[in-house]
Image (cartoon, grey):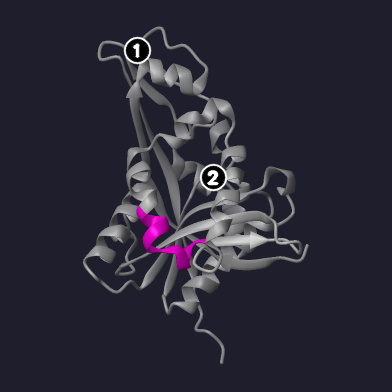
Amino acid sequence: MRLRIVTLAERPGALAALRRIQRRVWPADMAYINEDPVCGRLWPALLRRFPEFQLVLCDARGRVVAGGYTIPFVWNGRPASLPMGVDGVLTRGVRHHRRHRRPNALSALLAVVDPRLQGKGLSGKIVRAMGEIARRHGLRALVAPVRPTLKHRYPLVPMARYARWRRPDGAPFDPWLRVHWRLGARVLTVAARSMVVDGRVRDWEAWTQMRFPASGDYVVPGALTTVRIDRARARGRYVEPNVWMLHSISAPTT
């Protein structure tokens, strides 16, 4: 498939099509994935202040088939100093921009592919495009708080252990971790608190299409770990772990 990569700065009208793809990616019983308050508060600033870092992949007819969101930020290169995940790097990137600090790294935030075209290698093309954007802007590193695609099948397994699982050929067990690995990325650390969703029990029941009759930890559709339900407070809380991975960025060729 012939693809053209543009940014929202170059083609702002593509945002509507990209949002339609996002809505098709998450099933109805994963509605909670859109309820993270940090993303809800800062995503508009991401689009407004960093359109040159938001990627859109178009086919030969100009139709949007995939895309990726990223944010530049300041990082000293030490894994221990990375933010806690998507929420943290989004907050840090917006704060650094407001304070006019010059970024030296780029973080992926989200990659989406039209469900009708999944399995055709587009996700890897998005990651490569993110690396190209980093090079274009003179950034030294591309990091990604990766959300492993099969982790929801093993919600009781700690993320650090899951990230170490390997296939017989030595490649990561998880397909999305494997895409990054094949592109040269390595695991840095677990993003233990990548996103947090805190809501009323009745909201969680609506989001997941489940019922929570007693307090405790519950396995819910698509979640990478359990949701803690507290019936006394009528609240539910989900803290999602991701995996920080690092891609090396080579200098642009001349």
Q: Which residue is mark 1?
A: 215
Q: Is residue 34 above or below residue 174?
A: above
- Disc 1 residue type? Ser
Pointer 1 local density, CA inside 10 Å: few below 14, some 14–19, many at least 20: some
What residue sits 45% from the left and 41% below the top? Answer: 159
Q: Is residue 172 magenta?
A: no
**Residue drawn at (32%, 65%) of the image:** 78
Q: Position of residue 9 (x, y in %)?
A: 49, 67
Q: Dot 2: within a 10 Å radius of its alpha carbon, few (fewer than 14), some, or many (20 or more) residues?
A: many
Give the residue type that dot 2 points to.
Pro
Q: Secondary structure at mark 2?
A: loop
- The image quadrant of residue 226 is top left
**Residue where numbered disc 2 is placed:** 148
Could you tell me residue 64's position as x and y percent? 66, 55
Residue at the right extreme? 1
Quadrant of the image for the C terminus? bottom right
| In the image, farthest residue toward the left | 99
